Image: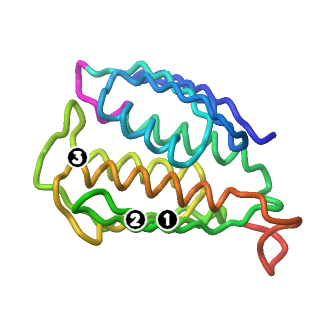
């Protein structure tokens, strides 16, 4: 069973994450104090079929930025730890996901090399209690922590709640595929992932 538990405390946030990559009926519980982020991470875990528990306490009296970014960081660390040396995984994952009028593409490589391309824009400043600019910060923090490459593009935009939702769902599906066990050995002709 591949799982990891991470705890990180700073002067701005305290984050606890438990992630379980395998299992038929994953348990999901997300409490960050930011309702919209909780909703997005629940969708991510459900559509990625990951067991996920997150509790976060942050300086929300300032704004949501530190909490969103730090949750992304710690979640990324947990995935990196759960994957270990990445032996036997598929490595690459891909999803094209429609949500009503919105269409999103996600491509993931859990290569050990962090990189983010995010092809999305929002006209709204905020959805619920979360600033839309922090969506980029979440994904950037995740790829740094997980040491993964993520290309996430909104191919057809529309309702911005739908757009964000489709991004997190597609990301979950693509990451699930990339983490899936597919054989033995390191998935690289180099014999190791950086």
> Which range is magenta?
61-67
Q: Is residue 146 left or right of residue 22?
A: left
Mark 2 or mark 3, whichever is nearer to me: 3
- Tell me the crowding category of disc 2: few under 14, some 14 to 19, or many 20 or more residues within 10 angstroms, Cα based: many
The residue indicated by pointer 2 is 152
* On-image quarter of the C terminus: bottom right
- Above/below status of 138 relative to 98: above
- Name the spot of residue 133 as percent of width and height, x first: 24, 49
Single out the residue that lies furthest toward the right.
Answer: 184
Give the alpha-carbon distance from disc 3 to disc 1, as whole Å: 25 Å
Q: Are marks 2 and 3 in contact (CB under 8 Å)?
A: no
Residue hosting label 1:
115
Q: Residue at x 24, y 69 (%)?
A: 156
Residue farthest bottom in this picture: 189
Residue located at (63% from left, 30% from top): 18
Mark 2 or 3 closer to N-term? 2
**Percent position of residue 22, x then y:** 72, 43
Q: Is residue 66 magenta?
A: yes
Separation of disc 2 and disc 3 at Cα?
16 Å
Is residue 87 left or right of 57 when viewed as pictured? right
Where does the image place residue 39, in percent across and percent down from the top left? 36, 34
Task: Return the disc, 2 or 1, that comes first in the chain's sequence.
Answer: 1
Q: Nearer the viewer, mark 3 or mark 1?
A: 3
- Left or right, 43 with reference to 90: left
Task: Decide: is 113 above or below 135.
Answer: below
Foreground label between 2 and 1? 2
Q: Quadrant of residue 91?
A: bottom right
* Residue 29 in picture, x, y percent from top left: 51, 25
Q: Residue at x 71, y 57 (%)?
A: 180
């Amino acid at each position: 069973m591949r799982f990891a538990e991470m705890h990180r405390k700073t002067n701005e946030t305290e984050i606890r994450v438990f992630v379980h990559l395998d299992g038929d009926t994953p348990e999901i519980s997300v409490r960050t104090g930011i309702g919209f982020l909780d909703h997005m991470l629940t969708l991510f875990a459900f559509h990625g079929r990951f067991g996920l528990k997150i509790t976060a306490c942050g300086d929300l009296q300032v704004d949501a930025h530190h909490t969103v970014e730090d949750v992304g960081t710690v979640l990324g660390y947990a995935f990196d730890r759960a994957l270990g040396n990445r032996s036997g995984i598929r490595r690459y994952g891909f999803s094209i996901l429609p949500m009503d009028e919105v269409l999103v593409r996600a491509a993931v490589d859990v290569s050990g090399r962090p990189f983010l391309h995010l092809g999305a824009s929002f006209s709204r400043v905020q959805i619920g209690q979360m600033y839309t600019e922090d969506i980029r910060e979440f994904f950037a923090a995740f790829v740094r922590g997980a040491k993964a490459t993520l290309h996430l593009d909104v191919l057809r935009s529309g309702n911005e709640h739908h757009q964000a939702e489709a991004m997190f769902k597609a990301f979950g599906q693509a990451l699930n595929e990339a983490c899936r066990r597919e054989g033995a050995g390191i998935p690289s002709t180099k014999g190791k992932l950086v």
